[in-house]
Amino acid sequence: MAFTALMYHEIRSKQTYEFGQPSPIEVRQNYDDRLPPPLFVSLEDFASQMEYLHLNHYHTLKLDEVKSYYYNNQSLPEKSVLLTFDDCYQSLAFFAYPVLKQYKFHAVSFVVSGWLNEDRKPFTPEKSICLTEADLLDMRDVFEYANHTDQFHTRTGTAVSRIMEAADEEFSQDLKHCNDLSILEKKDVFAYPFGLYEDRNIDLLRKNGFQLAFTSQGGRNDKSTDPMLLKRNVVPYFLSFEGFKEIIM
């Protein structure tokens, strides 16, 4: 049995988003970046995708099921899919949460603890604004939260992230700071920022007790997949409905 992991970042209604427009991030950490257009999906498409999963009886996985699959030789339910959302932007609460709750789906959100804003901010579709820890607490009936670093979700250019440049001790400390966030119950699960990593990063995660780590490489996961290099399929704005169905088959 294999499973597909889907990766989402930002959701916008088609009325408020023109594909390709820049979306600056607004986070607590002093970091300036833009969210690439392919990491958006329209609310209308997202709702249709979740409706399709519901009508076709897909099982939305929890992280403990994935861990048991790899470490306890447990099987997965038929038609299993793992829904993941990175960075905890406002659309997680405004758009994703109501749709997922409607279908009683489970999902994972990878949290950059140093990005969470201290105070709630008005929804602003022109920016990618992070939620607060209180916002995440309100969504625990749908979401479970895992480590996406504290201050290390930064990059140099497009091909080098901070975890690739930092000393192992620095990376270990950053992982600990993120895991200290009370909302993070899954402290042995990680997603590589920007999908970038080096072999020594994988080794360090293992030494720190992590059991699952997610990339942004597409494909399905089966028993032969290294659980520290799990594949996730980006669901981009321009993906057709037929293309979505092909990903999850």
Image (tube, rainbow, N blue to C red):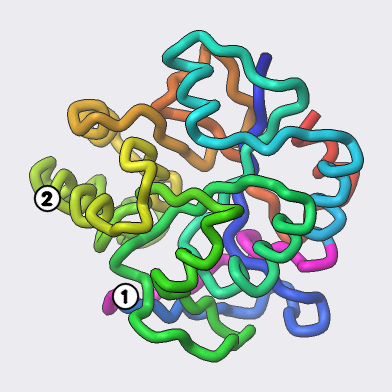
Quadrant holding the N terminus: top right
Q: Is residue 35 magenta?
A: yes
- Can you say whether 135 is above or below 120 in the image? above
- Can you say whether 25 is above or below 156 in the image? below
Q: Residue at x 29, y 35 (%)?
A: 198
Left/right placement of residue 180 relative to residue 81 reads: left
Amino acid type at circle 1 is Tyr
Q: Residue at x 34, y 81 (%)?
A: 118
Q: Residue at x 32, y 51 (%)?
A: 160
Where residue 146 appears, as percent x and y from the top left, is 40, 48
Left/right placement of residue 177 relative to residue 188 reads: left
Left/right placement of residue 31 relative to residue 108 reads: left
Where residue 151 appears, as percent x and y from the top left, is 25, 63
- SS class, disc 2: helix
In the picture, residue 13 is in which quadrant? Answer: bottom right
The residue where tag 1 is placed is: 31
In the picture, residue 247 is in which quadrant? Answer: top right
Mark 1 nearby-residue class (10 Å; few <14, some 14–19, many ≥20):
few
Where residue 152 appears, as percent x and y from the top left, is 27, 58
Where residue 119 appears, as percent x and y from the top left, is 39, 85
The residue where tag 2 is placed is: 170
Q: Tag 2 or tag 1, which sits nearer the N-term? A: 1
Labelled disc at residue 188: none
Q: Nearer the viewer, residue 230 or 64?
A: 64
Q: Which residues are magenta?
A: 29-44
Residue lying farthest to the bottom in this orientation: 122
